[in-house]
Amino acid sequence: MEERDFFDERTEPRTMTLTCTKCGVAGEYALNWIVRRKKKQLNGRADERDRARFAKAMNYMVLRDDTANCTNPRCRKRFDIAGIKTMAFID
């Protein structure tokens, strides 16, 4: 079985405070995250190895965006997102 068989996947926007690297203005940005939540149970075709992997699996999210557009009307340039973890586990 593949990892995607263990999780339900959807995209969620989350707001973060970022600073533009071009103009230095801080602002709120909505970043897209792929949220993977563990399914309640496995389907019937899983073997013992898959069940062991499923027992260790945890909910997590992965950052989908790698750049953002500045919200400053004078700047409006695209900058790389830095200083944020690209993957986080969810309780």
Image (cartoon, rainbow, N blue to C red):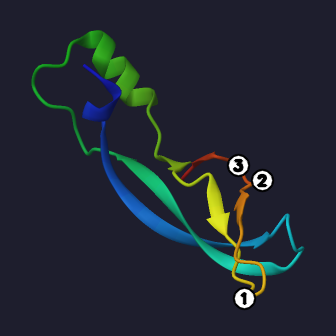
For image coordinates 47% across by 39% down, the residue present is: 58
Give the image location of residue 38, x and y in percent.
Answer: 35, 44
Q: Kindly identify which numbered label has been placed on residue 82.
A: 2
24 vs 81: above or below: below
Q: Nearer the viewer, residue 15 or 82?
A: 82
Q: Residue furthest right?
A: 24
Viewer-nearest of discs 2 and 3: 2
Answer yes or no: do the residues labelled 2 and 3 have beta carbons within 8 Å? Answer: no
CA distance separating discs 2 and 3: 8 Å
Quadrant in which the C terminus appears? bottom right
Q: Nearer the viewer, mark 2 or mark 1?
A: 1
Up-down relation of residue 34 to residue 24 (above or below): above
Task: Name, please, the residue furthest toward the left.
Answer: 44
Is 91 placed left or right of 56 in the picture? right
Give percent across and percent down for residue 5: 25, 32
**Residue that numbered label 3 is attached to:** 85
Which residue position is annotated with label 1? 73
